[in-house]
């Protein structure tokens, strides 16, 4: 395994190592079942610390490229050919059924209408000019009107920044804050966002392990200034914050100058029980609202957006003179028309119904499989559920499932400190978004098989 790390590159060495190994796995240079070198051997080979190798291996484990086998080490667990595309393991994995919380059902997309909009856009002379740095004004205007009608958010188009994915927007946002400003996240959390933020100069701190109520005492005790929160689902808990708790979090931000809230609502369109956004409750410009069309429409549309408070917008414009949205002009203009003509609203309302029906069917199948031992946790509607089986631990179920060709995750899969502080009462995180009813039923029956 040949790997080169550049200490002058400005990116953490463990991230460089993670990217190099994951690329080798995706491209088929490291085949499924291959054992990775021990941490000590690879550290010696690359002249880095074992902590660097450990950090990369843990990321590979978190993102599913490898599995950890006692007395054997880390084994590649990702079926790929030389020509495979870079598809995250959560969607495609060696197992027959993958209960991924990231799966999105694309079978109901109005392809004809979207294709026509793309075709019509191609005849627009404006698409051949330079792209607007912050995103096309047509798209930002459409988003502005949509946000007001959908969630009561009042914002002018100039406060909206468009970007090629939520991770891209977050990374460019993080560098605006001084290095001594810490970003706060719940634990467990969405590890993709955590790793993305941790890769930059800001320190990311996590609140103590908590899979139930949001811990306000821990928030006030932390020395962080910026809270990243997903109030509509608190991924991976599938548990939304009520309006009272949202106000308490907003009160925390208002209690001290320099505090902000990043409100991640990338999943909100496909949830059927929504409260007020923290942004719409905010009167002091303390909230950054983050949204995305990758979840609400389709993963191929890597277009996300954020709404910035006026002071941060001014800071953004000074600090990102050379920023570009990195989303094609054609896609942006077509998406603007998709919103303006009502296709987007019609789509996500239909998908809410689809996901709600799948959730009910998954719950029914798991209840049939485990009877009264199956306990559904969390009430937030999305593309996954949180659950327990009282007769078995989450780890026992995951191992049994894998032997029967089923991929399952649990809260510990998203625990940043799981090796040091594992979750005692671990819960399963079972996704169903991209699965058919047949696959859901098959997966539930395979999990039951001992």
Image: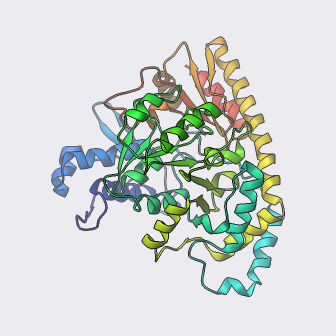
Identify the image quadrant of the N terminus: bottom left
Q: Is residue 398 left or right of residue 58?
A: right
Name the one closer to the observer, 199 or 71: 199
Q: Residue 193 at x, y = what percent?
A: 47, 49
Seen in the picture, residue 90 relative to 135 is either above or below; the reply is: above
Q: Say if residue 29 shows up in the picture.
A: no
Disc tally is 0
Q: Residue 4 at x, y = what percent?
A: 26, 64
Name the one closer to the observer, 142 or 311: 311
Q: Is residue 21 left or right of residue 107?
A: left
Identify the image quadrant of the C terminus: top right
Based on the displayed image, in which of its 4 quarters is residue 218 positioned? top left
Residue at the spot x=50%, y=62% of the render? 311
Q: Is residue 299 left or right of residue 110?
A: left
Name the one closer to the observer, 78 or 278: 278
Seen in the picture, residue 359 relative to 328 is either above or below; the reply is: above
Residue at the spot x=67%, y=65% of the render? 156
Q: Residue 108 at x, y = what percent?
A: 79, 52
Q: Residue 313 at x, y = what percent?
A: 52, 65
Residue at the spot x=68%, y=73% of the render? 137
Seen in the picture, residue 422 relative to 309 is either above or below; the reply is: above
Tell me, what colour scheme is on the image? rainbow
Based on the displayed image, in which of its 4 quarters is residue 205 positioned? top left
Q: Say if residue 211 shows up in the picture.
A: yes
């Amino acid at each position: 395994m040949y790997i080169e790390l550049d200490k002058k590159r400005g990116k953490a060495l463990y991230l460089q190592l993670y990217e190099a190994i994951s690329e080798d796995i995706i491209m088929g240079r490291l085949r499924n079942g291959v054992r990775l070198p021990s941490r000590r051997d690879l550290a010696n080979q690359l002249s880095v610390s074992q902590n660097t190798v450990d950090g990369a291996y843990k990321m590979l484990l978190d993102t599913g490229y490898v599995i950890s086998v006692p007395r054997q080490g880390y084994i590649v667990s990702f079926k790929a050919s030389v020509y495979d595309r870079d598809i995250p393991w959560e969607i495609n994995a060696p197992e027959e059924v993958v209960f991924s919380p990231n799966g999105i059902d694309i079978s109901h997309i109005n392809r004809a209408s979207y294709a026509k909009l793309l075709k019509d856009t191609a005849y627009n002379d404006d698409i051949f000019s330079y792209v607007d740095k912050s995103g096309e004004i047509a798209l930002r205007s459409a988003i502005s009107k949509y946000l007001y009608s959908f969630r009561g958010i009042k914002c002018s188009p100039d406060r909206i920044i468009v970007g090629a994915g939520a991770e891209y927007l977050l990374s460019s946002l993080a560098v605006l804050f001084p290095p001594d400003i810490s970003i706060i996240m719940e634990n467990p959390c969405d590890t993709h966002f955590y790793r993305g933020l941790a890769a930059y100069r800001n320190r990311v701190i996590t609140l103590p392990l908590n899979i139930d109520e949001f811990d306000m005492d821990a928030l006030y005790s932390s020395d962080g200034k910026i809270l990243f929160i997903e109030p509509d689902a608190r991924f991976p808990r599938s548990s939304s914050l009520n309006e009272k708790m949202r106000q308490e979090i907003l009160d925390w931000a208002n209690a001290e100058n320099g505090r902000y809230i990043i409100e991640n609502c990338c999943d909100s369109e496909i949830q059927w029980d929504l409260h007020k956004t923290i942004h719409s409750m905010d009167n002091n410009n303390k909230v950054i609202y983050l949204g995305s069309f990758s979840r609400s429409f389709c993963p191929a549309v890597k277009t996300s957006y954020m709404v910035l408070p006026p002071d941060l917008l001014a800071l953004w414009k000074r600090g990102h003179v050379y920023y570009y949205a990195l989303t094609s002009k054609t896609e942006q203009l077509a998406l603007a028309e998709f919103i303006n003509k009502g296709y987007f609203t019609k789509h996500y309302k239909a998908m809410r119904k689809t996901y709600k029906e799948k959730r009910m069917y998954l719950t029914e199948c798991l209840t049939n499989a485990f009877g009264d031992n199956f306990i559904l946790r969390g009430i937030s509607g999305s593309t996954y559920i949180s659950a327990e089986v009282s007769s078995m631990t989450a780890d026992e179920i995951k191992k049994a499932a894998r032997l029967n060709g089923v991929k399952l995750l649990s809260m510990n899969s998203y625990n940043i400190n799981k090796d040091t502080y594992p979750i005692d009462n671990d819960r399963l995180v079972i996704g169903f978004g991209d699965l058919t009813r047949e696959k859901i039923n098959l997966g539930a029956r395979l999990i039951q098989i001992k």
